Amino acid sequence: MTSRPLPLIDFRSDTVTRPDDVMRQAMAKAEVGDNVLDGDPTVGALERRAAKLLGMPAALWTPTGTMANLIALSIHLERGDRFLAPRGAHVITDELGSAAWLAGGMPEPLEHDAGPGRPTPETLSAAIGIPRGPYYALRTPLLCLENTHNTAGGAVTPPDEHAQLVAVAKEAGLTVHLDGARIWHASVVLEVPPAALTVGVDTVSACFSKGLGAPVGSVVAGSPEFIEKARRMRQMLGGGIRQGGVLAAACLVALDRVGDLAETHENATRLAAGLAEHGWEVNAPDTNIVLAAAPDLEGRLAWLAGLGIQTLPSAGRIRFVAHRDLSAADIEETLQRIKTGG
């Protein structure tokens, strides 16, 4: 007699969540229009709300965070430019080289010598070098920051450190783009509004499908002049969604749930503590991402999968991501399976 497979517990990402009934109803009832020709009223409402939350004059809805970042980099860079970003930043490691291939920029990673996901101002200054060299010198017009930093374990950059990095960049004449895909998490942990984490940046992206439960959608925000260019770039990249209000409605519901992220942070902390009790080497999570070291990464991933625990590798470690579709009971069940081997 074969044993029944254990129910799956999915820690692969906070993008695996599914819209609940409230979100689906909002999507079904959304007022819509042709967002390419005349504008969609629900998309417009989302863009205005997101811009205000992010402390920016204007915002543009995009289907994905990767597209939002690519739009910003394509506008900020000219072909052959170098841009700086913390090592392991999403724009370097997780966007299939689009920053170089499509935006034409060459990435230069900055070491995390101020803490996970964060370079020191000194490291940034040294990487910038001479801002305006001779015509044949490499140009470095852009700094890309990331808050929270995904592959550093959802690490948060506090406002004072953010301000120091932005100040160094501005002093050297650089534009600053912030990949704020999970800026909502940083806002909740630090107990500050998202706009407090975008001070001084020229543009910022933010995502509604990472932790907030929307099935799709991000924004890129900046000046009205930037958004005018961004709208054309979005169309060029195939992001001219027509009746996008059906999707924007889900994003508006997601924004109502930013406060719920605190529960996912608590679950991640409990998971990390439990794994440590069982002898695992783990980070102390700032937000909802737990990174665990494993001497045999592939073997440990397969062992977890055999227990019905779905995870993914990240930066040479095992990544567990807590999200709104996992309860405290799921965390306890996970730890029990790991303790007993099933």
Image: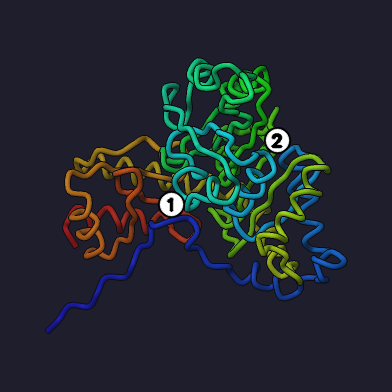
Helix, strand or loop under label 1: loop
Label placed on residue 237: none
Q: Closer to the N terminus: mark 1 or mark 2?
A: 2
Helix, strand or loop under label 2: helix
Vertical side of 225 occupied by 159: above or below? above
Amino acid type, residue under disc 1 in the picture: Ala
Left or right of 329? Residue 129 is right
Left or right of 229? Residue 219 is left
Mark 1 Cα within 10 Å, few/some/many (few <14, many 20+)? many
Residue reaching furthest to the bottom: 1
Label placed on residue 322: 1
Vertical side of 12 occupied by 281: above or below? above
On-image quarter of the N terminus:
bottom left
Where residue 5 sits: x, y (%)?
24, 74
Report the front residue among 212 and 175: 175
The alpha-carbon separation of the residues under discs 1 and 2 comes to 25 Å
Report the front residue among 209 and 213: 209
Q: Residue beneath label 2, please?
A: 195
Left or right of 69? Residue 94 is left
Where residue 148 sits: x, y (%)?
52, 39
**Which label sits in the foreground, 1 or 2?**
2
Report the front residue among 34 and 303: 34
Residue for point 72% across, 67% down? 241
Write down the quadrant of residue 38 in the picture.
bottom right
On-image quarter of the C terminus:
bottom left
Amino acid type, residue under disc 2 in the picture: Ala
Write down the quadrant of residue 289 in the picture.
top left
Residue for point 30% across, 58% down? 333
Where residue 30 sits: x, y (%)?
77, 71
